[in-house]
């Protein structure tokens, strides 16, 4: 039986990401700090995230491990636990490992799966360390076969599956997940209790919808770029949508996609109505996108994560007081229908997108934007934070 952690205890947040630019992990730190925890963090960047007491950067891998030969040796010849130590644990600062061994933390929050086998390493997770509450937050659904269908993915597949198997490890007292269908997939596979749903919602922003121009409807796509995120369909739709529709891509850096997009726009008949602009700072996105009218999130269901997509950008657009244009992605479509704050496109072809948009009036778009104002008061980080803290408290015995 693990001892109950005080509300002002010491917590460690672990993530194989640049935490400063990882909105879900940043919110966890905010919620824990607001609940009275003193928070340390372990992540890829050397920059200390706001509200963190001590940040420990994950070190660079050994040079031999990043060569082709080294990768092959590590993944073909080393036992799983040894491989995990060489690939990841050796990169964790000794000071942090000493703190864990000594039982410094009452709570350790693991994000995703990269560090999960650590809980089985008795050199660091001593009896004193295991007295902590261990929490797992699952951000998305991970393919049970391989991480990606490439040569590198095939080489590392056994290691990936081994790490992924720890999602069901009984060492974890509590779990949260990004949405209910993905939680159900993991629950069915691993047999643990239903995880608590904590959605990717930003903080509440108190702002009004921007006004509608009578001669222009401003469409937006913001966030991570990718052709699987509907870019082909959006560009094809812009070929035939009336001239009052303009399209802006506010994109995170991706050189390959940007080259492809520039090539497409060079000969596009609506080039003068399509813009590419730099991304906004993470904490300012909802304010920066407020001048636009409709956010397009048109994801063909090519995999579980796209099928059950409920991304940051969806909720950022709501806080931005934009209307939503989504396909029949069940989780997004259910919210849009519930609040009446947008259009659910009945198919995933460019023609379906055109038919759903071409006859929209400024008055109808303004109704969507006002409805997002209603949704924003219920779909925000403050509400989700209470669920996250409640999930943690429910696992302390």
Image (cartoon, rainbow, N blue to C red):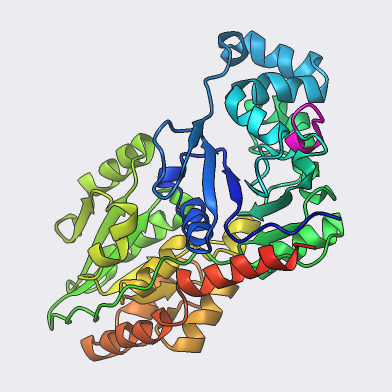
Q: Position of residue 71 (x, y in %)?
A: 66, 16
Q: Of residues 69 and 60, which is closer to you in this image? A: 60
Rendered residue at 42%/50% (across/down): 51
The stretch of residues the image draws in magenta is: 117-124
Decide which of 329, 115 is in the foreground and name it. 115
Q: Between residue 138 and residue 388, name the one nearer to us.
A: 388
Residue 31, placed above or below residue 279? below
Please state the horizontal and vertical placement of residue 296, each as a whole percent of the image.
37, 67
Q: Is residue 326 left or right of residue 182?
A: left
Q: How many marks?
A: 0
Q: Is residue 242 magenta?
A: no
Q: Is residue 79 left or right of residue 54?
A: right
In the figure, 321 relative to 77: above or below? Answer: below
Residue 129 placement (x, y as % from top left)? 75, 39
Q: Quadrant of residue 371?
A: bottom left
Q: Residue at 57%, 42% (x, y): give it.
A: 15
Direction from residue 116 to residue 67 in the image, left or right: left
Whether residue 235 is visible here, answered yes or no, is no
In the image shown, does 274 or 392 lie closer to the viewer?
Answer: 392
Q: Quadrant of the C terminus?
A: bottom right
Figure quadrant of residue 232: bottom left
**Residue 319's x, y, as percent?**
35, 73
Q: Can residue 122 be seen here?
A: yes
* Residue in view at x 46 percent, y 82 percent: 378
């Amino acid at each position: 039986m693990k001892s109950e952690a005080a509300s002002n205890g010491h917590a460690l947040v672990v993530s194989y990401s640049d935490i400063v630019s990882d909105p879900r992990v940043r919110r966890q730190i905010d919620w824990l700090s607001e609940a009275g925890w003193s928070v340390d963090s372990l992540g890829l960047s050397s920059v200390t995230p706001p509200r963190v007491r001590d940040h420990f950067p994950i070190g660079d891998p050994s040079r031999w491990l990043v060569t082709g030969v080294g990768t092959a040796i590590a993944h073909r010849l080393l036992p799983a636990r040894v491989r995990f130590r060489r690939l990841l644990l050796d990169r964790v600062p000794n000071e942090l490992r000493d703190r864990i061994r000594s039982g410094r933390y009452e709570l350790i929050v693991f994000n995703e799966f990269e560090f999960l086998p650590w809980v089985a390493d008795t050199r660091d997770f001593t009896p004193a360390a295991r007295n902590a509450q261990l929490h797992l937050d699952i951000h998305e659904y991970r393919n049970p076969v391989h991480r990606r269908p490439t040569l590198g993915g095939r080489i590392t597949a056994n290691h990936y599956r081994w790490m992924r198997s720890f999602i069901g490890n009984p060492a974890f007292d509590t779990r949260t997940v990004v949405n209910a269908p993905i939680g159900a997939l993991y629950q069915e596979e691993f047999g643990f209790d239903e995880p608590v749903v904590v959605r990717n919602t930003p903080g509440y922003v108190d702002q009004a919808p921007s006004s509608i121009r009578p001669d222009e409807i401003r469409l937006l796509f913001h966030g991570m770029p990718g052709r699987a995120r509907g870019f082909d369909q959006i560009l094809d739709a812009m070929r035939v949508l009336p001239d009052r529709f303009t399209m802006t891509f506010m994109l995170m850096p991706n050189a390959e996609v940007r080259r492809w997009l520039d090539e497409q726009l060079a000969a596009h008949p609506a080039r003068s109505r399509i813009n590419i602009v730099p991304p906004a700072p993470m904490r300012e996105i909802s304010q920066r996108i407020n001048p636009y009218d409709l956010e397009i999130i048109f994801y063909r269901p090519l995999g579980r994560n796209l099928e059950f997509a409920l991304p940051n950008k969806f909720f950022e657009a709501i806080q931005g007081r934009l209307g939503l244009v989504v396909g029949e992605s069940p989780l997004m479509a259910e919210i849009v229908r519930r609040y009446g704050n947008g259009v659910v496109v009945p198919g995933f072809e460019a023609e379906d997108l055109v038919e759903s948009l071409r006859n929209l009036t400024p008055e109808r778009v303004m109704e969507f934007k006002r409805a997002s104002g209603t949704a924003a008061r219920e779909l925000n980080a403050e509400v989700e934070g209470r669920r996250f803290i409640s999930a943690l408290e429910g696992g302390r015995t």
